[in-house]
Image: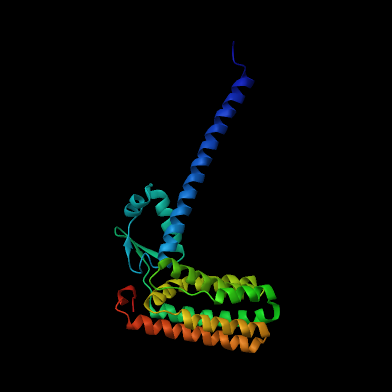
Amino acid sequence: MATTPARRKVAGGTAAARANGGTARKKKKATSLTESVYAMLRKEILTCALAPGTEISEAELADRFKMSKTPVREALANLRAEGLVRSFPRRGYQIVPVTFGDMNELFDLRTILEAGAAELACKRITEPEIENLRKLADIAYDQSEPPSLENFIKANRDFHFAIAKASGNERLFQLLAKQIDELERFFYLGARLRDVSTETQADHRQIVEVLSKRDPEAARDIMIRHNDITRQGLFEALTRSQGLSAFAL
């Protein structure tokens, strides 16, 4: 039986739809692979599993993750845009080194933002939010156990994020989140070199008590002091360590 033009058109449309569907699935898979590699590499960079200054290549990473170079290249482009890796023609990529200059600039900005966030939070924070901060302030870690350290760094991050959120200012929260992200490598390096559990717990508990009293001026002052103590402790630990190859001084 002869195929009518209408049937040929439907059949052609069906074939095109199948082809488009296949292309969409391939794009989705490629995007998924890119996001997966990006997330894994970003975590390794922030936790210093990939140490500052480490050189990497697309071929090496593609082999490691058992995939083509395309999603690896796209993931590295995203990390480069964030300032976590840099590229060199015909040489590959390098995890961006950290410097004391970087640390000071980030702490300067973080101190300004967190002081303002704590001041605003005093006017808006709720009792459930204060209770959550108390729980986060109690978390400690064991230097010899990487999962314990990772949990501690996450609790520290969540503690500061919660105060920024309680400020009620989303733009302030987003700015502060970026600074905390950029400082995370310093926190991992410093917490491995010395046990900061006791001093961090004490500082965080004092911050919670000030916030619970809803005293904006005291909240601003204690957050500035907390950042100054943290910065000084990191500086001393890193300058005393033998691992300064991670730093481009």
Residue closer to the observer: 56 or 221: 221
In terms of depth relative to the viewer, which is nearer, 94 or 211? 211
Q: Quadrant where the C terminus lies?
A: bottom left
Q: Left of 129 or right of it: where is 104? A: left
Q: In the depicted view, which residue is nearer to us: 174 or 232?
A: 232
Q: Position of residue 224 (x, y in %)?
A: 54, 86
The answer to whether residue 126 is seen in the rendering is: no
Question: What residue appears at the point 44 percent right and 62 percent down from the top-left corner?
Answer: 42
In this picture, is 26 found above or below 171? Answer: above
- Which image quadrant is residue 223 in? bottom right
**Which image quarter is the N terminus in?**
top right
* Residue depicted at 61% across the width and 24% down the height: 9
- Number of marks in picture: 0
Q: Position of residue 166 (x, y in %)?
A: 65, 74
Residue sitting nearer the eye, 188 or 249:
188
In the rendered image, which quarter is residue 247 located in? bottom left
Quarter of the image holding residue 86?
Answer: bottom left
Asked if residue 99 can be seen in this view, the reply is: yes
Q: Describe the colour scheme in one phrase.
A: rainbow
**x, y (%) of residue 143?**
40, 73
What percent of the width, then of the height, locates residue 11? 58, 24
Horizontal relation, residue 84 to residue 4: left or right: left
